[in-house]
Amino acid sequence: MITEEHLRRIALWSRELNVREIEVARTGIVEKSYRAGEAIFVRGDQFDYWTGVVFGLVSMGMVSRGGKATSLAGLTAGAWFGEGSVLKKEARRYDVVALRETRLALMDRTTFFWLYENSAAFNRFLVTQLNERLGQFIGLVEYGRTLDATARLARAIASLFNPILYPDLNRHLEITQEEIGALSGISRQNANQCLKRLEREGLLRLEYGGVTIVDLERLRSYGD
C-alpha cells in the first residue's frame, strides 16, 4: 500500500480519480526495486501487475530465436505499462529489463479491474494510453525498416518525450550513451557517433550524464 500523496506524485492518471477510487488504487499498489541489468520479467512470464516507473529507466524489447535483440520502447519515470496483458490475462509477449537502478509501482489485477469496471476517469486514461502506445509501435515498425542508425536513434530519443506516455519529463534527459544505444538497438560506439551528429545539427546538446533536447520536432521527424 502507498499513500495518496505518493500515488498522485507518481501517477498522472490518479489525479482525475475521486476519493473512493484513490483509496482503492493506493491500497492495491506496492513498490519494488530492481538493480541495473536485472530482468523485471521475460517473454512468456505471467506477470499479473499493471506497472508504473517511479524512478529509473526500463527497456521493453525481445530477443529472437536467432539471438537478435529488438528494442520496442524505453520507459522512464511516470510511465505506466502492461495494461494490454492485464486486460487479456495473457503471458507477456516481450522482455522488460531495468537499464539502471529502478523502482516500480505494481498494481495487482484485482485493483486494476475494479478501476476498469467502476471509474470513468480511469477508462478515459486507458483509451488514451492504448491509442498512444499503438501509434508508438506503428512508428517503431516504420522507422525500424526504413531509417538509418542516426534517424532510429533520434526517433528513439524523441519517443521518450511523449507527454501522455511519459508525463514527468523536461527537456533534459538523464541517460547514458550506453542506455541510448540499448533503446535504439545499436552499440554504444555507434550511439556516440549518432549523438555527435545530432549535436552538430543543433537538435540536442550532449552533457555530462545526459542530453538536453534543443529541437524536439526535428528529432521526431529526423530522416524524413
Image (tube, rainbow, N blue to C red):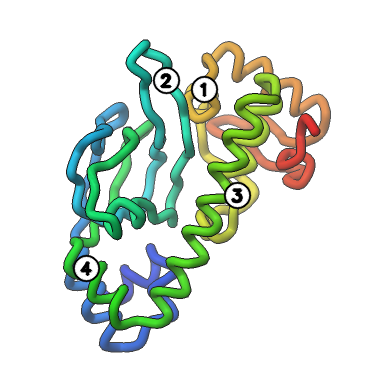
Residue drawn at (60%, 19%) of the image: 191
The first of marks 3 and 4 along the sequence is 4
* Callout 3 secondary element: loop
Q: Quadrant of residue 200?
A: top right
Single out the mark in the foreground, 1 or 3. 1
Quadrant for the N terminus in the image: bottom left
* Callout 1 secondary element: loop
Q: Are marks 2 and 1 in contact (CB under 8 Å)?
A: yes
Q: Position of residue 162 (x, y in %)?
A: 59, 53
Residue drawn at (38%, 52%) of the image: 81
Q: CA distance from mark 3 to mark 4?
A: 27 Å
The crowd level at tag 1 (other Cα within 10 Å; few <14, some 14-19, many 20+) is many
Q: Amino acid at mark 2?
A: Ala
- The residue where tag 4 is placed is 2
The crowd level at tag 3 (other Cα within 10 Å; few <14, some 14-19, many 20+) is many
The first of marks 4 and 1 along the sequence is 4
Left or right of residue 88: residue 135: right
Q: CA distance from mark 1 to mark 3?
A: 18 Å
Q: CA distance from mark 4 to mark 2?
A: 35 Å
Quadrant for the C terminus in the image: top right
Q: Nearer the viewer, residue 27 or 70?
A: 70
Q: Are marks 4 and 1 in contact (CB under 8 Å)?
A: no
- The residue where tag 2 is placed is 69
In this rendering, does residue 1 appear at all? no
The answer to whether residue 160 is above or below residue 195 is: below
Q: Position of residue 28 (x, y in %)?
A: 18, 68
Q: Nearer the viewer, residue 142 or 77?
A: 142
- The residue where tag 3 is placed is 161
* Residue 185 marker: 1
Left or right of residue 49: residue 200: right
The first of marks 2 and 1 along the sequence is 2
Single out the mark in the foreground, 3 or 4. 3
